Amino acid sequence: LYLTFQALEQGQIKIDDPVRIGQDAWSTGGSRMFLKLGSSVSVKDLIQGIIIASGNDACVALADFIAGNQSSFATLMNMT
């Protein structure tokens, strides 16, 4: 969430941006929001899903949206 709020603050993304749910996010296990493959969910709703439901699928969706993929997102996390 820290990187998400940072991206919002820097204008890289907007709170109402639609995030398309890809295969990686959809197939993520553990605690989930039960996002539907191919659907679009707003950044705001994904943030709420992470905070309220500990949504692992929402985390992956935002990581892919912000950095392009999870590996690049991990690199950003390590730089922060």
Image (tube, rainbow, N blue to C red):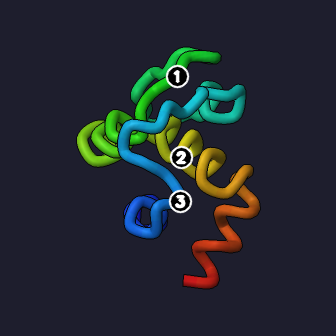
The location of residue 63, given as percent across then percent down, is 59, 51
Residue beneath the point at 69% across and 34% down: 24
Q: How many marks?
A: 3
Image: 9 above or below 80: above
Q: As rendered, which of 11 and 24 lies closer to the eye?
A: 11
Residue beneath the point at 24% across and 41% down: 52
Instruction: Tell me the mark number nearer the camera, choosing from 2 and 3.
Output: 3
Residue beneath the point at 38% across and 67% down: 9
Residue named by callout 3: 12
- Amino acid type of the residue tagged 3 in the rendering: Gln
Residue named by callout 2: 62
Binning the other alpha carbons within 10 Å of mark 1 as few (below 14), some (14 to 19) or many (20 upward) gives some
- Mark positioned earlier in the residue sequence (2 or 1): 1
**Is 2 on the left or on the right of 52, as rendered?**
right
- Amino acid type of the residue tagged 1 in the rendering: Ser
Instruction: Tell me the mark number nearer the camera, choosing from 3 and 1.
Output: 3
Q: On the rendered image, what quadrant is the N terminus found in?
A: bottom left
The location of residue 17, given as percent across then percent down, is 46, 37
**Is 70 on the left or on the right of 3, as rendered?**
right
- Amino acid type of the residue tagged 2 in the rendering: Leu
Is disc 2 in contact with disc 1, using a CB cutoff of under 8 Å? no
Residue 74, quarter of picture: bottom right
Residue named by callout 1: 40
The location of residue 53, given as percent across then percent down, is 30, 37
Per the image, label 3 sits on a secondary structure element best described as loop
The location of residue 38, given as percent across then percent down, is 63, 17
Per the image, label 1 sits on a secondary structure element best described as strand
- Mark positioned earlier in the residue sequence (2 or 3): 3
**Is 3 on the left or on the right of 15, as rendered?**
right
Q: On the rendered image, what quadrant is the C terminus found in?
A: bottom right
